[in-house]
Image: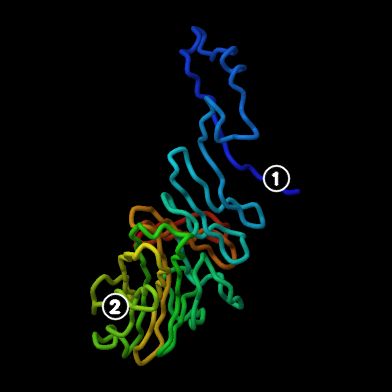
Amino acid sequence: DIWRKKASYHWNSQLPLNPDGTFSITEFNQQPFNWALDEQAVHWEKTNENTLYDNYSHELEARDINGSFAASLMNANASHVIATAVNASYNETAYSGAESLIKNSENEGNVNRGNGVPASGSVHTGSYSLLVGTGKKGFNFVLEEGEADLSRKYRASVWVHAPGEAETQSELNLIQLYYTINGKEIAAVHPVHQKQKSKSWYLLNLDVIPSGDEDVVIAVRNNSQRGVYFDDFRVHPLDASLTSYVYDKSTRELNFILDGNNFYTKFEYDAAGRLIRTSRE
């Protein structure tokens, strides 16, 4: 007994407009919308189809007139949108900044936290990042056969902070963003000392090429000698655009927007909630 919008159509006349700018009412009456076979409604063109909702009626996925998908990811309690993607379906998109994982082990933004623990000791955005201990794995996401289009290429991205003695090249080599297919590791990247770095955080990017018919696991791991922080883990098709959002944990104001390259714009507010400063990474 819950009714949600499924699709939108518009009338596509085959005749020229009348001199006064209207359609022919005769043609319109002769070609009514076919409610039983909506895909066969002659002269009615589908402009949008909602393909996925959550339990709270938030629209998570839609398909446009060209068949291209758009998707939204919600935080763990479904109160805020944490990522939006264009030209990507829901199951092809992932984002987590560990903000919704405190006292919660469920996935955030399609991402599992693995052995990582949310921590506030060092953050790239927001109030928390994921602390991954020695010999442990952290953020991970699965591109599933039958759910994601495995003929497409994907981009995985994550920010890494290796504190103290861990920030040597030999130790950085052991901090990795990688992917596997059928249990076999295909590719991995690690930080390069003082390269692709913003303040104390390194950005890792990895292009993922599925085999076409087997699940792909994308994850991070830490084999260095001390705990490492990971933040803003994202996956999306290479030809898609992903934007993610981070909110203040107390006021719920929007604090960060992460663009298509996983760089942030930061918003700061005064005590009355008025925007006073905007800065870019």
> Seen from this angle, which residue lies furthest right?
1
Residue toward you, 122 or 83: 83
Q: The C terminus is located in which quarter?
A: bottom left
Residue at mark 2: 190
Q: Is residue 121 left or right of residue 159?
A: right
User: Is 125 located above or below residue 133 in the figure?
Assistant: above
Q: Is residue 123 left or right of residue 152?
A: right
User: Is 166 located above or below residue 258 in the figure?
Assistant: below
Residue at mark 1: 3
Query: Which residue is rendered at x = 64% and y = 33% of the image?
Result: 35
Residue toward you, 123 or 16: 16
Count up the numbered dots. Answer: 2
Contact between marks 2 and 1 (CB within 8 A): the answer is no
Identify which amino acid the numbered label 1 is placed on.
Answer: Trp
Query: Which residue is rendered at x = 30% and y = 76% of the image?
Result: 188
Identify which amino acid the numbered label 2 is placed on.
Answer: His
Residue 252 x, y percent position in the rendering: 58, 61
Kindly report the distance in space between the C-alpha atoms of the residues bearing marks 2 and 1: 48 Å
Residue 227 x, y percent position in the rendering: 41, 87
Q: Secondary structure at mark 1?
A: loop
Query: Which residue is rendered at x = 43% and y = 82% of the image?
Result: 137
